[in-house]
Structures are given as structure tokens and as C-alpha cells.
Amino acid sequence: MSSLEKIIKNCAGIDIGSEKVFVSIEGEDVRSFRTFTRTYKELGFYMREHGITHVAMEATGIYWITLYDILEAMGFDVCLVNPADSKNLPGRKTDVQDCQWIQQLFSYGLLRKSFVPEDIVRKLRVYTRMREDKLQMASSHILHMQKALVQMNIRLPEVLSQTHGASGMAMIEAILEGERDAQVLLSYCTTDLRKRKAADILLALEGNYKEEYIFELQQAYDGYLFYLNQVQLCDKETEKILIEFKKKANNDYKDDNRVKPIRHNKPDIKNLHDLLMGIHGANPTVLPGLTDYSLMRLTAELGNNIEQWPNVKAFVSWLGLAPGKNQSGKMNKRSKKKAMTRSGQIFKQAAQSLLVSKQPGLGAFARKLKARRGAAIAIKATARKLAELYYKTFSNGMQYVEKGVEIYLQKQKEQQIKFLTKKAIELNMQLIDI
């Protein structure tokens, strides 16, 4: 049996901690460096002195990000690896042995490079993820406003679909300014609401306006507006990155498809659709469930180069949407499910919206599977189909055409007839139309 041959020469392995990083170079003693910017640069100079060109490091929390950026800027080929791929052998659990093990595996080409997008995508990712965090924080303040209202027995959450909608916020602002007359507060609602729900809203506004609850409502209202302002600031920075990204991509793509409306949390970015089309050179928003907002978030997570995944199966597996299969002989083993990436979550959110959508054929598929296997499996399977279509839009230049629920149901019927006909022949029987 031939011994393993070293594929990557002049390589180093790094184990990253919160206070120190340990670096292993073949033929040298392991050295440690503190986690400051200056010492990170000293680490780079140390590796350069020893002729190192390739570096492998584990993705440890967020500690790897700064070191990755610094070493990449210094010209090293940095390989970020999944800790699961470099699990230690029994008894090898120290920082010194970790970095030696990483270096050894890396030199033999036994470690896979994790997906790390280019710098401009990482910038976009920071702003879009921050935006999502601020939206979550804002939503917690909506709940606080609803709690304060209920404590005053102002039952707006029961009669309005959204307390933080235009009518709800207008009434809350009036209450905070001292208005207590239910008829006057009702006048802040839209004409449609006054026609449909005037009596219920008047009943809901007969509250117990205690001072401490008004103060609690004011605090929640101020917090909500604060985070909405933070979201707008994130949008401004995101717009700058998207403009820069479009110039870099240099695509002049346009189509005649209608731009889908964004119902919730619409980014305040001018010409968002055109910017995204210029970045990608294709329009995946024609897929059911995907809008420009979805595409913006996917761009921040995946970039605009789908070829980084060799095929659609690798892409779906990386997203965490592939069905697990762990079989040994005739035995199916249980195994820990692969964690889903943020991109996979975006596809799942799109798939969830299809469960209640009446037009797309994928919606009918999702509802049929939900009836048999449950909502969780139906959403994941539909998300996988969406991800496959997304990949093919870029890899094959596929043009998606929505054929609707009726076509899907007709195909299902044809398949069932084909199956029944085959069974009838096997049983020496005949199908007869009624």
C-alpha cells in the first residue's frame, strides 16, 4: 500500500482562540500569537519568512473573520475549514495538537475549503444581517406596545390586523399626545377601516388610561421608532454596496417581467430591482415566492457566482435542504441533521408563503405533501425545489414559466391514470370510464 502523498506544500495550520492563536509549520515548533491586530500581522510576517503560501484555519465563532481578512490582504491563500472535517483523534485535544493536525490534514489535501464569498459580498452580508437583527428588535417593541395597550384594556390588537399599521400607529401617537376621545381616535383610521370596523374600534378604545401604562406605551413606541431608523441607516449603506457591486459585475440585463411587490419590511433602496438584475445578469424573482427583498438577502449570503458549487446537488446539500440518507447495508441509521444555512432559511420562508398561495403549481405540491407528511417536511421539500430552480436559473440560463395549479393537478391525474392502468394490466383487469 503506497503512502499518502503531500499535495499542498509550504502550508500552515492555525488554531484560533479568543486570546491566542497557535500556528504550526512543518519542521518548526508551534508558536502562539495574541489576538490583536499587530500580533496578527506579526503572524503573517512569521509565515512569510518561512515561505508559507497556503494557510488552513477552523471557522471558530466570529474570531476567524479578522485574521482571515488580514492574511488574505497579505497575499496568503487562506482556506477556512469546517471543524467537523478536522475532528481530532482520541487524546489530541490541545491547541498545540489541533493546529498540527490541521496542518497535516491540509498538506495531504484532506480538508475541504468552506465557502467564503468575495470581500464586497461579505460587506453586503454585514449590512443585510444587521438589518434583519434590527427588524427582530423592532418586532419585540411591537409586542411591548401591544402589552401596554392590553393593560389599559385598549383592545386594538383584537380589532386590527396590524397594531403597527398606519391606522394603529396614528391612534397610538394621538393617545401619547393626550387624546382620549374614542370618536376622535377613530378619525385617524383609514376610510375602509371606519366603514368595516367602526363599532368594534370604538369599543376597543374605551380604555383605562393609567399613567404608568401610558409611560410603558411611550417607551415601547420610542424603541420601535429607534430601530426603524436603524433599519433605514442599514438600507443607505446597503444601497452604496449594491451600486458598487453592479459596477463591478458590469451586467446589462433587463427583462419585461413584472416587478413583484414587497409586502413586508421593504428596503428603502432606489431602483433595487435594476441593481440586483445588474449584479446577477438573470432574474430569479420570476420564481414563485421570491421577491427583490429575498434576492437581496440571497445575494448577501451567496454572492453572484453560482459556479462555486459544481452542481445543483452540491448546492442544495450546502444549503442544508437535502434529505438525509445514512444507510449501512440494510440498516437505516439515525444521524444528526446538518445545520441549515441562512440561505436555506430564506428559501424556507419563501416556501412557507407558497402554502397559502393559490396560483403557483409549487403551492399545490406543498399543500399535497403537507396533507401526507406534515408542514415541516412540506416546507423543506418545497424549499429544496425552489433552490434547485434558483441554481438552474444561473447555471443553465433557465427561464421559469409559471403554469399554475391546474396544469400541476392535470399532471397528477395523468400519473394516477398511468399507474392504475399498469396495475389493471398486471391483474388482468380493465379500467372503464364512468
Image: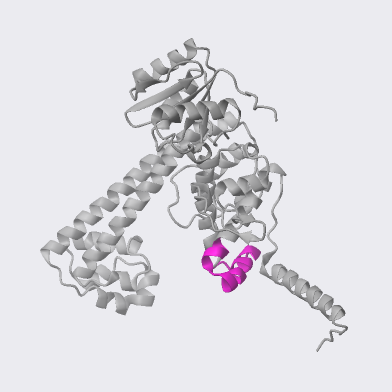
Q: Furthest-bottom residue in view? A: 434
Magenta segment's dominant SS is helix
Where is residue 115, by image quadrant?
A: top right
Residue segment shown in magenta: 356-379
**Which residue is at 33% across, 56% downward?**
139
Position above or below: 172 against 410: above
| Residue 77 x, y percent position in the rendering | 54, 23
For residue 281: magenta?
A: no
Position above or below: 391 against 158: above
Q: Quadrant of the N terminus?
A: top right
Drawn side of residue 4 relative to residue 433, left or right = left
Q: Which of 100 and 220 is in front in this view?
A: 100
Does residue 257 appear in the picture of this structure? no
Q: Which of 130 and 216 is in front in this view?
A: 130
The count of marks equals 0
| Residue 380 x, y percent position in the rendering | 56, 59
Q: Which of 174 and 93 is in front in this view?
A: 93
| Residue 319 x, y percent position in the rendering | 56, 48
Drawn side of residue 323 relative to residue 221, left or right = right
Position above or below: 285 against 165: above
| Residue 206 x, y percent position in the rendering | 20, 75
**Which residue is at 32% across, 28% downward?**
19
Q: Furthest-front residue in view? A: 1
For residue 359: magenta?
A: yes
